[in-house]
Amino acid sequence: MSTAAYETHEVLNQPPALENYNLFTTDRALMDAADRNGAGWAKDRLTVYGSRLGDAETIEMGRLAHKFPPQLKLFDRFGHRRDEVEFHPAWHGIMNLIIGEGLHSAPWAEPKAGAHVARAAAYIMHAQIEPGSQCPTTMTYGCVPAIKRDAAIAAEWLPKIYSRQYDAANKPVAQKTGALIGMGMTEKQGGSDVRANTTKAMPVGAGGPGAEYIISGHKWFFSCPQIDAHLVLAQSPGGLSCFFVPRWLPDGSKNAIHIQRLKEKVGNKSNASSEVEFHNAHGWLLGEEGRGVPTIIEMGTYTRLDCALGSAGLLRGAVSQALHHVFHRRAFQRHLIDQPLMTNVVADLAVESEAATMLAMRLARAFDRADHDPQEAAFRRLCTPAVKYWVCKRAPNAVVEAMEVHGGNGYVDEGPLGMLYKEIPLNSIWEGSGNVMCLDVLRAMQKNPDGLEAYFAELNPARGSDRRLDAAIADLKTEFDDLGEIEHRARRVVEKMMVTLQGALLVRHSIPAIADAFCASRLGGDWGHAFGTLPKGIDTRAIAERARPV
Ligand SMILES: Cc1cc2nc3c(=O)[nH]c(=O)nc-3n(C[C@H](O)[C@H](O)[C@H](O)COP(=O)(O)OP(=O)(O)OC[C@H]3O[C@@H](n4cnc5c(N)ncnc54)[C@H](O)[C@@H]3O)c2cc1C
């Protein structure tokens, strides 16, 4: 029988899926930022990765990994403990991709100028397709400096961490081709305030750096319990300390890390986050007893950079989808991009996205240079929490607006907006929530006055280019004249610092239309309370054309 009888209508005016495109070569702001910040040499590699990520097959893997979340397998069918997590094959496919690209360790395994920036550009792209896999990736990337504190652990583990083989097997590390590492800090009674940790660690012998301890207690959030080891904070006789806690012990038995349940999360669906108890688990002290926070906070510096990169990526993903939509969808006899009010909305979103990318990539440059440039080190210390705060704080509102650009389709979970929307609040919450980041900026200012100098030095080259920027710099300086109620004002101060820095970067490095739009709205105050309120006279079409993923 002819199928004509079943064909009720022709599907019209639905945009094609945004797929089989290159996330790198279609992102002018990212390409320029990678080049400018020292990773021009990585262009070919980033182009290949951008193409793989934009492939329809990869996009489908990302979708499936989120649609079929991991499941806890606590016991086998005979009642023996397994403490394992089962994943959809799409998760393993995505993990193969991100580990194969070295986003968990390449700057350590193959150090070179611009290595952190090259990785940052790839990280921004990966976030747009499958952000859940970035959790084990960033934790592994961040753990390396802490692991290097112990020669024996480093000798055994770093070669496996540096490997680009994704090996999901639940086996002792000696039998594996690659290893991944997580972190366990947060307990029920306190996450930001880790000094409230109650988990205990008692030395097996004399104790001290590198010695074995017995750990008992719990962690309320413990992501990726399926991976090979975690850095865990616990109270030892000398105070809060950091321990290396592997999943398997040197004698070939399983360590006593018992999963209680998996978290039922709003988003981040593909990634497994758990609650665990340590029933006399074994851990090895990293660094000194009582110095657990400084040891693990080093890891947090890298993961905070990644939160900013991740949110810049999620935002770029949402804005790309929105732009793709408005250039294809018609309403009231015109493409949406030709409706002036919609052009204002997508241009405003594109400005926000480029500003986020530029800021996060500038911070990544400081990670490349901090070791041999004190000004970059001071910039990194002050600006890591500030950039993390600001990029992660701004992105959720913009993603919601990008969703609305799609009309009803945006709210249907079959498309990519649902995943981006559910993921986007997370980077602001973990690795130090908003307030904690702003208070950390104040702490950095107090401890190291060079930080503010390094920050203002970054603004200097842009002075005199735009009167609104100059006024914002002058206004910002007044915030520091009187430090009264500085804690109360912390968000306000950090916000002003970051918006001013974004303005300075855009004035120097973006197209005039974007710099003008940013300075008029975010710095000059000629703006509303929602996106799509850029003032008249802005070349919104030029902004949309620049950001369009074609
Ligand atoms: C999906 C997911 C996965 C996670 N995975 C891990 C993991 O693998 N390992 C791990 O250790 N943790 C993990 N976490 C935990 C996360 O890092 C914490 O939730 C976070 O650090 C906040 O801690 P908390 O939940 O105890 O909130 P609290 O510390 O109670 O904070 C609550 C609120 O109070 C604010 N606040 C805190 N102190 C102050 C202050 N002095 N002044 C003003 N405001 C303040 C915070 O900014 C926050 O908004 C995960 C969380 C999530 C959601």
Image (spheres, helix red, strand yellow):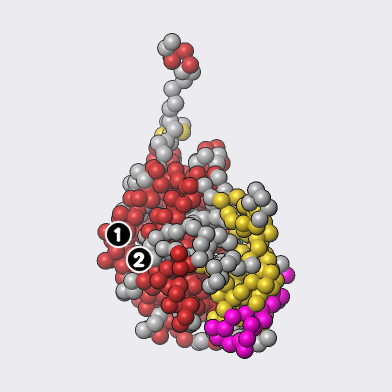
Main secondary structure of the magenta stretch: loop
Secondary structure beneath label 2: helix
Magenta highlight on residue 194:
yes
Residue at 43%, 41% in the rendered image: 325
Mark 1 CB lies closer than 8 A to ligand 1: no
User: Which residue was labeled with disc 2?
Assistant: 118
Could you tell me if the residues under marks 1 and 2 are in contact, i.e. CB atoms within 8 Å?
A: yes
**Where does residue 60 sit, x and y in percent of width and height?**
44, 43
Counting labels gives 2
From this view, report whether residue 74 is shown above or below residue 183: above
- Range of residues picked out in magenta: 189-213
Q: Residue 532, can we see it? A: no
x 30%, y 54%: residue:
48
- The residue that appears at 50% across and 41% down in the rendered structure is 415
Per the model, the C-alpha gap separating discs 1 and 2 is 9 Å
On screen, residue 230 above or below 26: below
Q: Crowdedness of circle 1 by 10 Å Cα count: few (<14), some, many (20+)?
A: some
x and y, in percent, of residue 181 in the image: 51, 67
Q: Residue furthest bottom?
A: 206
Q: Nearer the viewer, residue 27 or 187?
A: 187
User: Where is mark 1, residue-wise?
Assistant: 45
Locate residue 134, reporting x and y percent: 48, 59
* Left-right relation of 74 to 43: right
Residue 98 falls left or right of residue 447: left
In the rendered image, the vertical position of residue 155 relative to residue 391, given as above or below: below
Tag 1: amino acid:
Arg
